[in-house]
Image: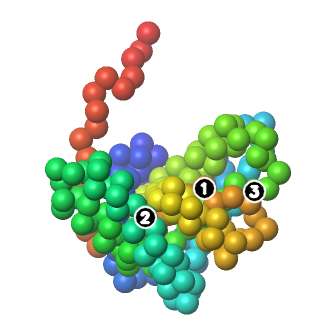
Amino acid sequence: MQTIDAIYARRSVRKYQNTMPSDEQITTILQAACMAPSATNLQPWYFVAVRSNEKKAELLSFMEGVSEKMRPMLEERFKDYPEVIKETLTFMKSLGDAPVYVLVFEQKNYEHKNFAVLQSISAATQNLTIAAADLGLGTCWMTAPIQTGFGKIIAQKYAPDKGEMIAMLTLGYPATQPKAPKRKDDRFVII
């Protein structure tokens, strides 16, 4: 697949097949993430791929709390779309039955460069999603655990010495191929 094709093929996947990606696929995706550009070559990211059923069950127990804390925000934002609220909460509680969860961290000692560090980690996370799409895998990039305060608990449990949790992704083979959402117009100009 061409890079541009992978970018256009990438979707936020919320339901996965019961098929574990290979070690080689997961390694390739994480290596691609680490090839991202970073401000002054800091490479401030750290990724934890969670595959074991025991660890995934622990994470799902945290996601129950995340979904309850997110409910009021979702009910306000999507008050005219109850199906969106229901689908989002269902996804948060089940993580779409994804076979792999990827936790994204900002390594310690980079807090003083926060803006540049967050941009760098976001570039690495984007690389991860595109590499997954290139290999026929899906992802869903989430920040709800961080928004609800569960990021600190998850970080302490899964990577206590690696720094602050920035994001979480699901990873696996899509059960269905979501349609591309409509993109907003007037988001760039060439001058």
The image quadrant of residue 25 is bottom right
- Give the residue displayed 47% in from the left and 79% down from the top: 60
Is residue 183 found left or right of 99 in the rendered image?
A: left
User: Whole-percent x and y of residue 106?
Assistant: 70, 54
Amino acid found under the numbered disc labelled 2: Lys
Badge 1: few (under 14), some or many (20 or more) residues near its Cα, within 10 Å? many
Label 1 to label 2: alpha-carbon separation: 18 Å
User: Whole-percent x and y of residue 101?
Assistant: 52, 72
User: Whole-percent x and y of residue 171?
Assistant: 46, 69
Amino acid found under the numbered disc labelled 1: Ile
The mark found on residue 55 in the picture is none
- In the displayed orientation, state which residue is furthest to the right: 109
Count all numbered tags in the image, as a single digit.
Answer: 3
Q: Secondary structure at mark 2?
A: helix
The tag earlier along the polypeptide, 3 or 1, is 3
- Give the residue displayed 74% in from the left and 50% down from the top: 44
The tag earlier along the polypeptide, 1 or 2, is 2
Is residue 11 found left or right of 129 in the rendered image?
A: left
Residue on which disc 2 sits = 69
Asked if residue 10 is positioned above or below residue 170 in the image, the reply reads above
Is the Cβ of the residue at disc 1 closer than 8 Å to that at disc 2? no
Badge 2: few (under 14), some or many (20 or more) residues near its Cα, within 10 Å? some
- In the displayed orientation, state which residue is furthest to the bottom: 54
Label 2 to label 3: alpha-carbon separation: 26 Å
Residue on which disc 3 sits = 107
Residue on which disc 1 sits = 166
Label 3 to label 1: alpha-carbon separation: 10 Å
Q: Secondary structure at mark 3?
A: loop
